[in-house]
Image (tube, rainbow, N blue to C red):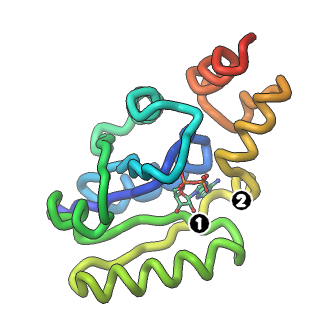
Amino acid sequence: MRTAIYPGTFDPITNGHLDIIERAAAMFDRVIVVIAINSNKSPLFSKDERVELVRDALSELPNAEVILHEGLMIDCAREHSAIAIIRGLRAISDFEYEFQMALMNRKLEPTISTIFLMPHEKYTYLNSTIIRELARYRQNVSEFVSPKVAEMLALKYGE
Ligand code: ADP
């Protein structure tokens, strides 16, 4: 059983994240989407809401699941016997931080590799911050997120 974890904040999950999950699910027996709990961040969506939105997005991917994790990602990978950590690379701007993290994780656990996947180019400019910002000003985000995420965003911003 070849397992990969795909960690992130997912505040909220977008079609760019989903594109990466679909690619990973085609390569691994099991993909675990890990919602990282970071006490320094104050997300728009609660842990449980983010889990619910990711779970809804994964409904057609039988080998993908979602969990919450607080602490180091490499510990999460070890706990689930993952052989890889998946990350999405959108642009050069992602590279420096991702490069540092991948090398540090490899130092901590040489047997686990970080794998970078590129989404379809139509998602390269997409991130959760932009989606929240668009939704806040009542822009239509249905092209970028699932109907359920769009609905939850509208509720958050009081529509
Ligand atoms: P962000 O707040 O940057 O959207 P997350 O912390 O939730 O993202 O991201 C988790 C992982 O997903 C990271 O590896 C990030 O680079 C990747 N990712 C985020 N958005 C996209 C996208 N539109 N296309 C591909 N990868 C993405």
Q: Nearer the viewer, residue 37 or 134?
A: 37
Q: Earlier in the sequence, mark 1 or mark 2?
A: 1
Find disc 1 in the rendering and name its residue. Answer: 118
Q: Nearer the viewer, residue 70 or 65?
A: 70
Residue at the (75%, 45%) spot, across then down: 130
Q: Is mark 2 within 8 Å of ligand 1?
A: yes
The quadrant of the picture showing ligand 1 is bottom right
Tell me where residue 84 sits by quadrant: bottom left
Residue at the (35%, 62%) spot, across then down: 27
**Residue 53, how many percent across, how many down?**
47, 29
**Residue 58, how many percent across, how many down?**
41, 35
Find disc 2 in the rendering and name its residue. Answer: 124
Q: Quadrant of the C terminus?
A: top right
SS category of the residue bearing label 1 = loop
Q: Is mark 1 within 8 Å of ligand 1?
A: yes
**Residue 54, how many percent across, how many down?**
44, 35
Identify the disc placed on residue 26.
Answer: none
Q: Residues within 10 Å of mark 2 (few under 14, many from 20)?
A: some
Dot 1 amino acid type: Met
Q: Nearer the viewer, residue 79 or 31?
A: 79
Instruction: Give above or below for 54 relative to 33.
Output: above
